[in-house]
Amino acid sequence: MADALLGIVVENLHTFLRDQLATFYGVQSQIQELSSNLTAIHAVIQDAEEKQITSHAVKDWLNKLSDAAHVLDDMLDECSIKFNALQIPHGNCFSCFNPEMILFRFDIGKRMKAIRDRFLQIDEERRRFELQPGVVERLQEDEEWHQTSSLITEQRIYGRHQDIETIVELLSTGAGDGDGEDLAVYPIVGVGGLGKTTLARWVFNDERVIKHFDFRIWVCVSNDFNMMRILKSIVESATKKNPDLFTLEAMQKRVQEELLGKRCLIVLDDVWNEDQDKWEKLKYTLQCGSGTKGASILVTTRLESVASIMGTCPFHHLLPLSEDENWLLFKHYAFGQEREERAELVTIGKEIVKKCAGSPLASKALGSLLRFRNDVKQWLSVKISKLWDIPEGNAIMDALRISYFNLDLSIRRCFSFCAIYPQDFQIVKEQLIHLWMANGLIKARGNMEVEEVGNEVWDELCQKSFFQDVRTDSSGTITFKMHDLFLELAQSIMGEECVVSKSANLTSLTSRVHHVSCLDFYETLNLNQGALKKAESLRTFINLYPTLSNSRVLPTISSLRALTTSSSKLSALKNLTHLRYLTLYNSSITTLPKSVSRLQKLQILKLEDCDYLSCLPKQLTQLQDLRHLIVKNCESLVALPPKIGNLKRLRTLSTFIVHPKEGFTLAELRDLQLGGKLHIKGLKHVPNECDAKAANLSSKKDLNCLYLSWGSNANLQCNDDEKVLEALEAHSNIKSFGMKGYNGTKMPNWMNNISLLSRLTNVIFYDCNNCEQLPALGKLPHLTILFVCGMRDLKYIDDDAYEGAEEKAFKSLKKLTLFRLPNLERVLRDERAEMLPLLSELSISCVPKLKLPHLPSVSHLQIQGLKSVFDYNGNKSIASFPEPIVQNMHHIKTLRIEYFYEKVLPDELSSLSVLQELVLFGCDELESLSENVLQGLSSLRILKIMCCDRLNNLTEGMRHLMHLERLEIWACPELVALPSSMNQLTSLLDVTIFGEDNNPIIPEGLQYIPSLQILTLYNVDSLPEWLGHMTSLQQLHIGLCPELRSLPSGFRHLTNLHKLYINECPKLAKQCKRESGEDWQNIAHIPHFELVAVQEETFCDKISTKWNPRKSTKDQSYYLTPDYEFDRMVDQL
C-alpha cells in the first residue's frame, strides 16, 4: 500500500514546512530534501504498483518504501503533537526551552537525518527500474451519469436457471435421502467468482424450497471452520436471537433442540475445511440421532477435496457462464435500464466479456467500472490493459485488478485497508469509515466534512461492486460484506502489512506489520508485548468480536492510531499519543482516566458495556479534535464532563446528561453540529422553555435518532414539561424517537405535524403518565416499531379521523408493544379504517380494557402481567388475561404468557390450531392445563412451563399434542407426576427438567415417553432407578446437581445412549471418574462422555456480582429498573 501512504506523507511534509514546524525543530533542510525525493518517487508510483505484479524486485522496493513512509509519518505526527502541547493555555513562552523539549529537538534532528538517508537509498534504487511517471491515467467519470445513478441490486440471475432447477429438484424431492444417511449433503463446487453463493441464495429463497422445509438456515463458514461460531450462527439464524451460551456443550444442545424432528435446510457457504475430523464433529451435532430425517445441507466450496469429505450426493460442478449470458450480465451493470447502448461501446464491451472467461464477478466488476464512462478511449483502455497479460494470472483476478487500478488513489487505499477483515465478515459501514479516518486515509475536502468524504468513498466502492450484501437495520445501521476474491485482492495488496489473527496467541509478528485484527471469540487473548514491539510502526490493533472476548490486553505501542481494548489498567494510555480511535468495551473501570485527555489527536471515543463507569474526566473537553463520543450500555454513567459544547468539532454525542449546574445545561448543545443518535437525560433539570430552546435541536439536520428522558423522579409540574417539550422540536430527518418520564397532559404541536414526523420508523413512549393523547401515529407511512408503556388515561393509540375505508392505519407497523395502559380501549378511535396489515409481533401487558381488531398477520404474541401491580392511585391489583385476546389472531405460531393469575388457562386458546410454541412463565395461580385447551393445540411442537408454583397437573389432555417435540419444565415444585397419556406422544424427543430448590425431584411418568432421545436434568438430588430402563435415550445431560451422589445401576442397559454430559455435580463427578469411579462400569460403554468440574467463582466475579446484582440474574428483563429498561431499548435501536 505504498502508493496510498506516500501521498499522505508528501502532503504532510508540505504542511510541516508551511506551518514552520521544520524551522522550529531545526530540520528544514532535511524536510525539503525529503519532500523533493518523495515527490519524485510519487510521480512513478503508479507504474511501480503495476510492475510489482510481475517483478519481485519492484515489490521489495515498494515494501521498503512503505515501511520508511510509515516511520516518517510517525515522526511528523510526533513533532506536531509536541508542538501542539506547547500551545495549550497552561503552557508558557519558555516551554520550548525546557530540557525535555531541547532533548526532543536533538533526537528528532538525528532521526530525521537517518530517515533522509534511508529515502536517498530508496530513491537511488528506484533508478534501476526505469519507472515511468504518469502511467495510465485514471478513467474519468461522466458526472451527469454519476449524479443520476443509484446502487445496483441483483434483481435477476443470469445463466443459472438450469442449475437452480437441478438443485431445487433434488432438495424438494428428497433425492438425497435414499442412501441411508441421516443428512443429505449436496456440494456446489466451482472456482472463485463463478457465483456459487449467488446460486445458493436463489435456491435458498425458491418458493418450492421454502414450502418443502420447515425452516432454513444460512451460515457463512469461510476458511475459519470454528465449531462454536458455526453453531452460534445456526442458533441465531433459527431463532433470530443471540443464544448467549459460552460452552460448546450448551451450544451443541441448543442446536439439537432447534433442529430436532424438523425438516430443515442448512446452507454452509464458502467452506474451506479439509479436516475430516472437524466435519465429523459438526455432522454428529447436526444429525441429532434419527431426529433430523429429511434434513439437507447445501455446501458451496472451491475445493473438490472439501466436497469429497462432506458430500453424500454427487457434486454439482458450477461451470463458467456462456459468453451470451455473461454479456447480458455485463450489459446490465455497464448500461443499466436507461442508458443508450452505443454500437461502438457494445462491440468493445463484448471483447472485454470474452476476457472475463465466463466469470460473473469479473463481468460485474468491469461493467460497474464502465457504467459512468462514455468515451470510447476509456472502454478501449480496459480492453487493452497490460494487466490481462500477467503470467500465471487468471482472468477473474486480472479483471478485479483492472477495476482496482482504475480507482482514484484515495479510494484505492481505503479499499486495500479492508484486508483487516476476515472472509464473510459483516462489516459496519460507520466503523470502517472511522478506521479510515484514524489512519489518515480520508480527510476533509473543501466544504465536505471528513465523514462525508468517507461516505462518498464507500458509495463509490459499493457502486463498483467492491462491496456487496448491503443491509440497513431498523435503526439505520448499514452493514455489508466483501466477496472473498475482492478480499484476496486487498490482502495481496497489503501483504505483510496486515494480519488477521485467528489464534488467541499473538507471538510472531514481523517488523512490517502495520494493522492487526483479532478474532479471539471465546478465548483469552495472549498478547506478547515484545512481539508487537517488533513492528516498526503498528497503526491498528482491533478486536472484531469484542462482545465475545475475554481479552484484558492494552498494547503499549506508541505508534497506534486505532485501538479496541477491554483492559481496566489504562495507565499506559498516556503514551499512546498518536491515537485517533479508541474503543473501550466490557471494562470494569469506574472512571475514565485523566490521561485520556492527553490524546490530543483523538477523533473517535467509544465506551461500550462498561457497567461500572460512572463519570468521565472534566479534562476531556481538551480533546479539540474529538468528533465522535459514543456511550452505549454504560448504565452507571451519571455525568458527562462540563462544557461539552467546547468540543466544537463534535459530530456524534450519543448521550447528554443535563444537570442544573453551569456547563451541564442544554445550551452546551446549541452550536454542536450533531448527527446520528442523541439521548438527552435529566430533562427534569430543565426549568423552562428558554433553556430547552437553547439545545437548538430543530437545526440538527443530521440527527436521525432522538430520545428524551426526564428521569424516574421527574418534575410533576406538567405545564413546565409541556413547554420544555414544545421547545425541543426535532428536525424532520429523524427516523427514531422516544421519550420517558414526560409529565405533560398533551403532546407538543410539532408532534402533531405528520409531515415533520413522516420519516419515523421507530417510536417509544415510556411512562408518560399524565398524557391523554398520542400523535396520529397511524398516519406515519414508515413506522415499523411502536412501544407504548405507562400512560394511565390513554384510551386510543391513535384517535385521529381517517378518510373512509381506503386509508390504512399503521400500514407499515410490524412490531407493537403495549404495557401498563389500564384504560386503553382500542388501537384506533375510528374503527372504520383498515389497520395493522403487516403486524407480526404483538406484546401486551396490563391492558384489561383493550379490544383488538382482526389481526390475521400476527404470528408472535406475548401476554404479560406483573406481580403485585399497583395502579396509579396506589391500589394493589392483579393483571388478568385481557378480554378475548386471541380470537382475532388465528395464525399465531408462538405465544408467551407471563404472570397470568388464574387457576386454568382461558378456553379461547383452544382456537390456536396453528400454534407451534407455547411458553408459560410465572403463572403462580395456575394449577392445571385444561383438556379443552390442549385439544385445540394440534400443531404444538414446543411447550415450556417455567416458575409456576402451584401447577400440579398437566392433565390427560396431553395426549392431543401429537406433534409435540420438546417439553421443558422449570421450577414447578408441585408437579411431581406426568399424566399416563404421555405414552402416546411418539413425536416427543426432547425433555428438560429443572428442579425447584424446595423440591428437586424428577416427575414420575417421564419413563413412559416412548421415543425420548434427549433428556436434560438440572438441580435434582437423586435419579430414579427407572431412568436406567429408558432405552430410547441417546443423549443425557445432567447439571447443577450439588447433592446428586450416584447413577442408577441400570445405566449399563442404555445401549442407545451415545452421549453423557455431567456439569457441576461435584459428588457425582467422583463416582463417574474415568476408570476409577464406582459408577464408571455403568457408563464405560457410552462413546461420548464429558465431565465438567465445578467452576468456582473468582474474587473478581464476587465483587462484580456485589456491585451489579443485575448481572447475576438469569433473565435480566424481569429485574430492570424503569430507567435502565428505557436506556437498554434506546441502546439496542
Image (spheres, grey):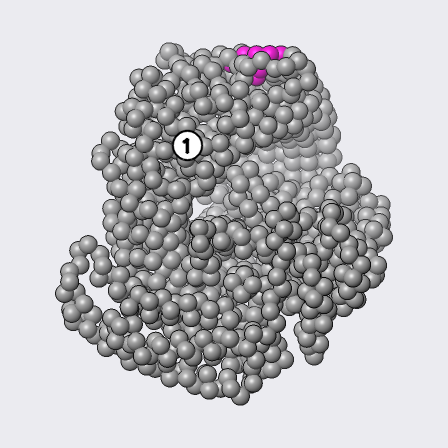
Where 666 sits versus 1054, above or below? above
* Left or right of 134 in this view: 33: left
**Is residue 854 on the magenta stretch?**
no
- Name the spot of residue 584 as percent of width and height, x first: 38, 52
* Left or right of 702 in this view: 20: left
Magenta stretch?
A: 824-831
Question: Residue 186's quadrant in the figure?
Answer: bottom right
- Name the spot of residue 29 as percent of width and height, x first: 31, 79
**Residue depicted at 68% across the width and 56% down the height:** 371
Where 832 sits versus 134, above or below? above
**Is residue 830 on the magenta stretch?**
yes
The 10 Å Cα crowd at callout 1, few under 14, some 14 to 19, many 20 or more, is some
Secondary structure state at the residue bearing disc 1:
helix
**Residue depicted at 54% across the width and 17% down the height:** 798
Task: Residue under label 1, please give it.
Answer: 698
Q: Which of these two is toward me, 109 or 1101?
A: 109
